[in-house]
Image: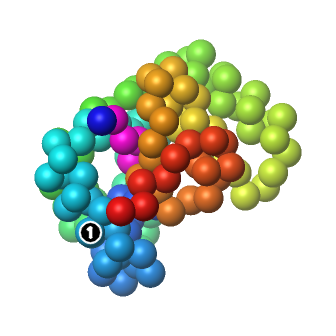
Amino acid sequence: MSVFVDTSALLAVLHGSDAHHARAARIWTTLLERDTDFVSTNYVLVETSALLQSRFGLDAVRDLVDTITPLLRVAFVTEDVHAAALAALFAARRRQLSLVDCVSFATMRRLSVTRAFAFDPHFAQQGFELVQH
């Protein structure tokens, strides 16, 4: 089973101070036990790294790089995916929707990934199933 991993989930897994940490840790452990194919994008990793560094410092970024990133199949965003995501962002005209979100949705569709490990409601709004257990 393939599951897309979003920034919101990565932050929750890595930091006990996150409101979703306990739930995220349980979900992450369950998915690991099921030998899940974790998929994400380099944009998600950049976004997560920037947030970790600004909130918690470089040691937090190293945790991401050393413990989480090796478990992910990272889809590097191509020019056409980036362009499609920008078009979707501008068409949506929603301030709370980010370019990284739109890239994630486009990537999921291109890779036929229907499930997301995320605490961002935009994934469900786009028709993806959120991993809840």
Residue 87 appears in view: yes
In the rendered image, residue 125 lying in the magenta stretch gets the answer: no
Residue 123 picture location, percent across and down = 59, 48
| x then y, percent, for residue 48 | 41, 55
Identify the residue at horizontal 62%, vertical 58% (top origin): 121
- State the residue at coordinates (56%, 18%): 79
Q: Which residue is mark 1?
A: 26
Q: Residue at x 56, y 42 (%)?
A: 128
* Foreground pick, 38 / 114: 114
- Out of 62 and 73, give the one closest to the viewer: 73
Q: What is the crowding at mark 1: few (fewer than 14 residues within 10 Å), some, or many (at least 20)?
A: some
Q: Residue at x 52, y 47 (%)?
A: 129
Q: Quadrant of residue 3?
A: top left
Instruction: Name the kind of residue labelled 1 in the image.
Output: Arg
Relative height, residue 26 to residue 131 (above, below): below
Would you identify the image quadrant in which residue 80 lies? top right
Q: Is residue 50 left or right of residue 37?
A: right
Q: Position of residue 26 (x, y in %)?
A: 26, 69
In this rendering, position of residue 20 left or right of residue 30: right
Residue stretch rendered in magenta on the structure = 2-7
Q: Position of residue 40 (x, y in %)?
A: 38, 39
Q: Residue furthest top?
A: 80
Taking the image as drawn, is residue 62 in sight? no
Magenta residues, dominant SS class: strand
How was this image coloured?
Answer: rainbow
Question: Residue 49 lies in what quarter of the image?
Answer: bottom left
